[in-house]
Structures are given as C-alpha cells and as structure tokens.
Image (spheres, rainbow, N blue to C red):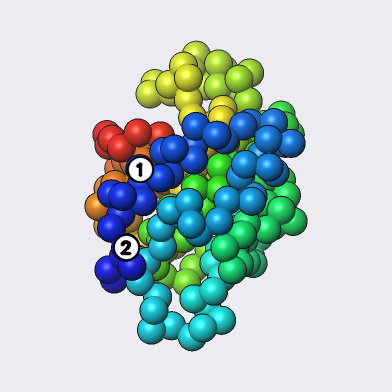
C-alpha cells in the first residue's frame, strides 16, 4: 500500500512532536493523547476503505507473558483515546515488576501501519513493552545486546511478533517505513521496534 502523504515530511513532524512528549502521566495526556492528525502521524493509504475504518485506527495486542489482551480503537477522528491508552499501558507494563509507564502513541501508529503493510489482522504478541530501570539493569547483567539507555525505559519501544507473518518479512517491512529503530533477532521469536532515530541492526 502507498502512504497518503510524503512520509519523510511527516516523520519530521513526528520528531518535532516527540520533543514535546513528556513521560509523566499529565504530560502524556496533554501532549500525547491530544495530538491530532495535523501533527503528521502517518498511516497507510486506506482511502478505498470504508469511511468508518478510515476515520479510526484499531489495534490488537496480546501480552506473551500474562495472556492479557487489548482489541480496540486507540485513535479516532484525529485524536488519541486516553481510555484505550490506559489499557495499553497496563498490558505493556513491566511484567517483572508490575510498573506501568505511558506508551508513546507513535509506537502504536508504527505498529498500525506495519500491520496494514503486512496485510494481517492478527493480534501482535508483545514480549516486552515498558521496561523499568531495575529490570533493564538486570537484563544487561544477564543478556547481551541490552542497551544501557534502552528506549523500553521511556515507553518508546516494544519487542513484538505478528503471528502468520515471518519475522524476516516483518523486519523488512518495518525498515521500509523509515519510522524508527528496528532490531532483528533471527534466533528469537520476536523483533524490536522503537520510535527513536531511524536505524536497524
């Protein structure tokens, strides 16, 4: 599918919006959930879809560790839904400590576009969303490849898979979006995406 507008231009708008993004709940609700389409969040070309579909964005998530599910509209008619993001924040919490943290709305937008590009209606499996500093430090001691300043600690990253879609294909598609970081672990059952600078490994 083709993007409705030029993605490079919109990604510049995303970067400007990201500078206003605050991690605390009050800042998140003010600067995250009230962002409108005018700020440049990009979506796949769904012009030929039904008007009700084109006006909203839905996503399906499954926490691979807890079995919790989310299915619903997280964005509608230019605005993010605070209730939906409350559920998403709970599902994507640090399952090791139970700590919750606001999830960057752009992460959902990247996943939304990626799912459309992959032509899938399946639920994403979330292996890791928010990661507390304590958990991140522990994983750094036990595992290679865990960044000291991981974007997981900012609610800006997720380790995911999309059942029915090969990880190699999902990686290739994610890289083609030029929307953030993409990490590929061929010996694992997931890949990493984030809303940081465009890069891949």
Q: CA distance from mark 2 to mark 1?
A: 13 Å
Q: Is residue 101 above or below residue 113?
A: above
Q: Where residue 7 sits in the image (x, y, percent)?
A: 30, 54
The quadrant in which residue 187 appears is top left
Q: Where residue 117 sits in the image (x, y, percent)?
A: 33, 65
With 27 as the anchor, is 64 left or right in this view?
A: left
The quadrant in which residue 163 appears is bottom left
Please state, as top left, top right, bottom left or bottom right, where the C terminus lies in the image.
Answer: top left
Q: Residue at x 51, y 83 (%)?
A: 51
As helix, strand or loop, the secondary structure at mark 1 comes to helix
Q: Residue at x 48, y 19 (%)?
A: 149
With 124 as the anchor, is 145 left or right in this view?
A: left
User: Is residue 187 visible to the viewer in this orientation of the structure?
Assistant: no
Q: Closer to the camera, 129 or 187? A: 129
Q: Is residue 2 above or below residue 98?
A: below
As helix, strand or loop, the secondary structure at mark 2 comes to loop
Q: Where residue 155 sits in the image (x, y, percent)?
A: 57, 36
- Crowd band around label 1 with a 10 angstrom C-alpha radius: few (<14), some (14–19), many (20+): some
Residue hosting label 2: 5
Question: Counting residues from the N terminus, which is met first, the one under dot 2 or under dot 1?
Answer: 2
In the image, which disc is placed on residue 136?
A: none
Asked if labels 1 and 2 touch by Cβ distance under 8 angstroms, the answer is no
In the image, which disc is placed on residue 12?
A: 1
Q: Closer to the camera, 200 or 180? A: 180
Q: Where residue 91 sits in the image (x, y, percent)?
A: 67, 48
């Amino acid at each position: 599918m083709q993007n409705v507008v030029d993605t490079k231009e919109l990604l510049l708008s995303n970067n400007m919006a990201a500078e206003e993004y605050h991690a605390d709940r009050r800042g998140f609700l003010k600067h995250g959930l009230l962002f409108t389409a005018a700020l440049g969040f990009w979506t796949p070309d769904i012009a030929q879809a039904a008007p009700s579909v084109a006006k909203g964005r839905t996503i399906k998530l499954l926490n691979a560790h807890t079995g919790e599910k989310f299915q619903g509209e997280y964005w509608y008619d230019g605005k993010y839904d605070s209730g939906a993001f409350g559920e998403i924040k709970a599902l994507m919490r640090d399952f090791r400590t139970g700590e919750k943290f606001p999830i960057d709305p752009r992460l959902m937008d990247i996943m939304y576009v990626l799912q459309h590009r992959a032509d899938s209606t399946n639920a994403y499996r979330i292996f890791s969303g928010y990661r507390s500093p304590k958990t991140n430090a522990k994983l750094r001691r036990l595992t290679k490849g865990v960044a000291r300043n991981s974007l997981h600690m900012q609610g800006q990253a997720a380790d995911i898979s999309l059942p029915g879609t090969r990880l190699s294909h999902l990686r290739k598609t994610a890289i083609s979006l030029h929307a953030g970081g993409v990490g590929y672990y061929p010996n694992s059952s997931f890949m990493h995406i984030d809303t940081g600078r465009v890069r891949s490994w």
